[in-house]
Amino acid sequence: MTYDDKIKELKINLPEAKAPVGNYVATKITGKLLFISGQISINDNGEIIKGKVGKDLNTEEGYNAAKRCALSIVSQLKKACNNDLTKVKSCIKLTGFVNSTDDFNEQPKVINGASDLIASIFGDAGMHTRAAVSTNSLPLGVSVEVDAIFELN
């Protein structure tokens, strides 16, 4: 089964791969590594998921926000591979940033939303290293941002 078949089987609708809003690129390939810039939490209506996890959102809502980031990562990945996901060898690393309150300590559970989505699509090739970092603020007030590194064939 191809990764595209898996996306269809899971009934995943990928969002449009958005262009960067600053002086950077969405993706960059060096050698066999593909770096994907941080993708922010945007719901399926195109609205930014804002607020602090632990105050405005609970852990489950943060998990879903991280999942939305991962959907955007897959969209950027697909675009960088000219819509050919057979070029993907593995996911190397995800770094997740959680806009959270000082006393919130479930950042790993939040970023599992991104990790679980990547693993559900790519299987063993989707197993990656990871960091789940708390922050007091993120651009535009978003709840979660996740970037990624993939290895290409």
Image (cartoon, rainbow, N blue to C red):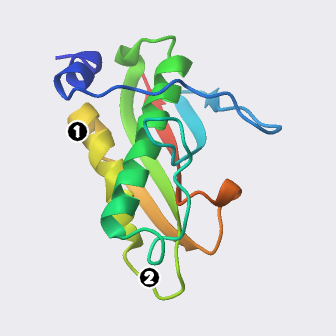
* Separation of residues labelled 1 and 2 (CA atoms): 27 Å
Residue name at image x 30 percent, y 63 percent: 60
Q: Secondary structure at mark 2?
A: loop
Check the picture and name the quadrant holding the N terminus: top left
- Type of the residue with mark 1: Ser
- Type of the residue with mark 2: Phe
In the displayed orientation, state which residue is furthest to the bottom: 103
User: Sequence-wise, which precedes: disc 1 or disc 2?
Assistant: 2
Q: Secondary structure at mark 1?
A: helix
Location of residue 135 with respect to 144 vertically, above or below: below
Residue 152 at x, y = what percent?
Answer: 45, 25
Per the image, the residue denoted by label 1 is 120
Q: Can you tell which mark lies on residue 104?
A: 2
Residue 137 at x, y = what percent?
Answer: 65, 69
Residue name at image x 26 percent, y 32 percent: 121
Foreground pick, 152 / 46: 46
Residue 133 at x, y = what percent?
Answer: 51, 69
Residue 89 at x, y = what percent?
Answer: 36, 27
Indicate left or right for 16 with 10 as reference: right
